[in-house]
Image (cartoon, rainbow, N blue to C red):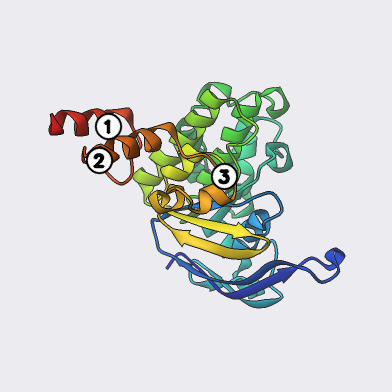
């Protein structure tokens, strides 16, 4: 098990006792890719920060990579195993250059110089940032900054990547490219991914969907079930991806379709097979 929430409650003192998260129970298995969905204020960012111990539950337990986040002696290892990437990249940029920024976390964990150099090169290359390694971070575009944050996280070689809307604030092509990079790395490394998002295509590409509403977990299921007519997506105002709608229309006409459609080629193959 990569992550476990056992009857987790959390409230911010300034909110006069109203819980930000209320009685959350769940398990996430190693290697799963989980979409975390919900309206603004539903508790998604709180959920993400509880995973690596930036916040601690008022009640219940969060077990990350087999360690209790409430145990101070485990926090450093938890934060190495569970990398958190925030929505605003400027909040996590520290180094004078992109290369320095990726190296910063490794230095804090006293990674040997030769291994550090290899990890920095590997992380920059994985996010297509090698040519920008000596660029000052404030001169990077928003998409490049987001990829730099991801490179910093990946350099730690985490078992669990927590993405708190790391693809938001990007134009559609850049957003798609960034999420594709995350997906490819997950396939290559087998790491677990928790991805908070509002994007239907990203949700559809995940193995599982968690929906938070007013701090409560109101849905835990597959993306196909999430997008079904009258389902949770409708309730929170998310329109299904166009390919999903097309596949369901064809299915209604008697043409067999896979339950989860991610590429137009899959629809074409199903049409060809049924002709």
Calculate the distance from the C-alpha at mark 2 to the C-alpha at mark 1: 7 Å
* Residue depicted at 66% across the width and 71% down the height: 22
Secondary element type, mark 2: loop
From the image, tell me which residue sits under label 2.
257
Where is residue 182 drawn, in percent x and y? 46, 40
* Residue depicted at 68% across the width and 29% down the height: 137
Q: Earlier in the sequence, mark 1 or mark 3?
A: 3
Looking at the image, residue 74 sits to the left or right of residue 194; the answer is right
Tell me if residue 96 comes above or below residue 2 in the rendering: above
Secondary element type, mark 1: helix
Where is residue 69 drawn, in percent x and y? 61, 70
From the image, tell me which residue sits under label 3.
197
Question: Could you tell me which quadrant the C terminus lies in?
Answer: top left
Tell me if residue 131 comes above or below residue 252 in the rendering: above
Q: Earlier in the sequence, mark 2 or mark 1?
A: 2
From the image, tell me which residue sits under label 1.
267
Q: Compare residues 6 and 234 and report the one nearer the observer.
A: 234
- Mark 3 Cα shell of 10 Å, populated few (<14), some (14-19), many (≥20): many
Q: Compare residues 236 and 29 and report the one nearer the observer.
A: 236
Q: Is residue 195 visible?
A: no
Taking the view exactly as shown, the residue that stands out farthest to the front is 253
């Amino acid at each position: 098990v990569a992550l476990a929430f056992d009857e987790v409650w959390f409230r911010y003192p300034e909110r006069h006792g109203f819980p930000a998260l209320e009685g959350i129970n769940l398990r996430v298995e190693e290697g799963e890719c989980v979409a975390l969905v919900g309206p603004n204020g539903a508790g998604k960012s709180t959920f993400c920060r509880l995973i690596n111990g930036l916040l601690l539950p008022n009640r219940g337990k969060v077990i990350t990579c087999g360690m209790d986040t409430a145990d101070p002696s485990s926090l450093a290892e938890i934060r190495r195993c569970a990398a958190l990437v925030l929505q605003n990249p400027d909040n996590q940029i520290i180094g004078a250059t992109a290369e320095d920024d990726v190296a910063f976390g490794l230095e804090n964990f006293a990674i040997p110089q030769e291994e550090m150099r290899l990890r920095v090169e590997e992380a920059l290359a994985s996010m297509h940032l090698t040519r920008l390694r000596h660029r000052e971070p404030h001169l990077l575009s928003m998409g490049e900054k987001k990829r730099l944050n991801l490179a910093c996280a990946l350099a730690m070689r985490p078992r669990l990547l927590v993405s708190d809307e790391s693809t938001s604030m990007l134009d559609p092509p850049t957003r798609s490219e960034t999420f594709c990079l995350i997906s490819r790395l997950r396939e290559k490394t087998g790491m677990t991914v928790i991805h908070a998002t509002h994007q239907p295509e990203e949700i559809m590409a995940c193995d599982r969907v968690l929906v938070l509403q007013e701090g409560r977990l109101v849905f835990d299921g597959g993306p196909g079930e999430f997008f079904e007519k009258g389902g949770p997506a409708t309730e929170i105002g998310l329109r299904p991806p166009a390919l999903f709608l097309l596949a369901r229309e064809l299915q209604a006409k008697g043409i067999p379709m896979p339950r989860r459609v991610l590429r137009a080629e899959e629809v074409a193959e199903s049409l060809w097979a049924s002709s």
